[in-house]
Structures are given as C-alpha cells and as structure tokens.
C-alpha cells in the first residue's frame, strides 16, 4: 500500500487525533487545523509557541523541524491559514522540481536526489494577507554571523519605517523570522514550502 493510500485509510482517525493532541492549545488553532486535515493534499503548520514547523497530511505529521528561536514584528500572529504566494532568495536554485522516473513514486525519492544540497539556507516566504516569513539557520561560522548581523540590522532599522508606512497607508503587515538548528533544515524547508501550499501560522 502506498503512503497516500495509507493516509486515506487513516483519515478519519487522524483528524480526530488532531483535536486530542492539540487539546492544550488555542481552540481556534485546533479548529483551523482540523479543517485543514479534512482537506485534500499537504499542508504546513508553523507553530512559534511550540517552536516547530511541520509538514502534515490529514492530521498525520510527515516531517517536523525544530525552531531554535523566532521573532515577530507588526500585526499580531493569531491562528490563521495563509497560502504561500512566493519564495525569494538572493541565489535561487536553478531547479526546484524533480520529476520521478517512470514507475518510481515521488515519496520514494530521497531528498538528496531532489538536490537538497543546492537549496538556499537564507530565504523568505510571502503569504496572503501581507505576511512574510524569513528563514535562516543557526550561526556556525564568521561568514554566517556577519550575514545574520546584517539581517538584524534590517530587522531593527527597516521594519520600524515599514510600520510607520503601513499605518499611514492602512496596510498592516506581519513579519516573522525563524532560526533553524542547521543549514540542512533550512534547505529542507525551502524545498517543502512550495507555492500555493496552505500554511497554518500560530504563536
């Protein structure tokens, strides 16, 4: 039985499990995740409170990454579902979609084959409702440290000006930054966050 078929069999049980596993959390968050779990296809959960990012299908967690730390600027982060509009990075990979060979199921393809090593480690994701998520790995060397210092300079220098402009133009925004444990995790998130993916964001 393929993985997709197994999800279909477990659908009802997994949807119920969502409510049980998240019982200690915000009722609105539970409600929104159950709605996503009932829908077809994959979705992601960015949970700043639990410091995690998950890729899920029908309530089943397929992959989970730890968030070392996070910060938010702008409009408060309430449980909401937003669709990914675009990913952006300074040096985008030449190829982000891999077509399985005939007779080979996509879930059997290793991430290494999917050119994970060529995915960027620093990138941003734009969502509906003027939400932006920045992803970067934990600092490991002086070059990464310098790059992260630059990121902090933009965070505390540019965002206050953007807040003023947002107030004047009546266009509120939310800016989120998360730091992953490793570069590998950041690359995997870039590959996983494809356009039109529904993401449940909560703090």
Image (cartoon, helix red, strand yellow):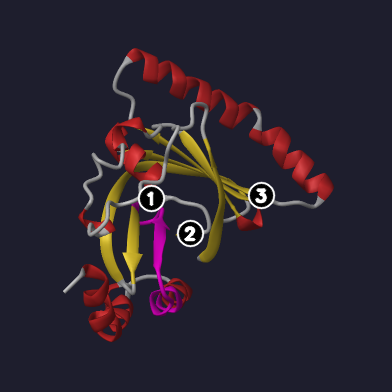
Give the left or right position of residue 158, taking residue 192 as reference. Answer: right
Q: Is residue 43 magenta?
A: yes
Work out whether mark 3 precedes mark 2 in sequence or the reverse, and give the earlier one: 3
Image quarter in which the N terminus is found: bottom left
Task: Identify the residue at image location x=40%, y=78%.
Answer: 34
State the CA–CA distance, disc 3 to disc 2.
Answer: 20 Å
Image quarter in which the C terminus is found: bottom left
Work out whether mark 3 precedes mark 1 in sequence or the reverse, and give the earlier one: 3
State the CA–CA distance, disc 3 to disc 1.
Answer: 24 Å
Residue topped by disc 1: 192
Magenta span of residues = 34-52
Q: Assign a secondary structure to mark 1.
A: helix
Q: Residue 52 at what x, y percent from top left?
A: 33, 53
Q: Residue 63 at what x, y percent from top left?
A: 26, 56
The single residue placed furthest to the right in the displayed view is 168
Residue topped by disc 3: 173
């Amino acid at each position: 039985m393929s993985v997709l078929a197994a999800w279909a069999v477990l659908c009802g049980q997994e949807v119920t499990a969502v409510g049980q596993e998240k019982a200690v959390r915000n009722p609105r968050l539970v409600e929104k995740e159950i709605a996503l779990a009932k829908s077809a296809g994959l979705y992601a959960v960015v949970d700043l409170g639990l410091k995690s990012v998950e890729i899920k299908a029908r309530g089943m967690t397929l992959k989970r990454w730890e968030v070392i730390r996070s910060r938010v600027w702008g409009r408060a982060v309430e449980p909401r579902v937003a669709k990914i509009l675009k990913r952006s990075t300074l040096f985008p990979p030449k190829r982000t979609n891999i077509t399985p060979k005939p007779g080979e199921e996509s879930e059997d393809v290793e991430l290494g084959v999917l050119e994970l090593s060529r995915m960027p480690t620093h990138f941003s994701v734009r969502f509906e409702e003027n939400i932006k998520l920045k992803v970067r790995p934990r600092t490991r060397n002086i070059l990464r440290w310098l790059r992260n210092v630059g990121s902090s300079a933009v965070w505390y220098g540019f965002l206050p000006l953007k807040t003023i402009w947002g107030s004047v133009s009546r266009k509120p925004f939310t800016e989120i930054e998360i730091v992953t444990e490793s570069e590998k995790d950041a690359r995997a998130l870039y590959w996983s966050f494809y356009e039109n993916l529904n993401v449940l964001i909560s703090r």
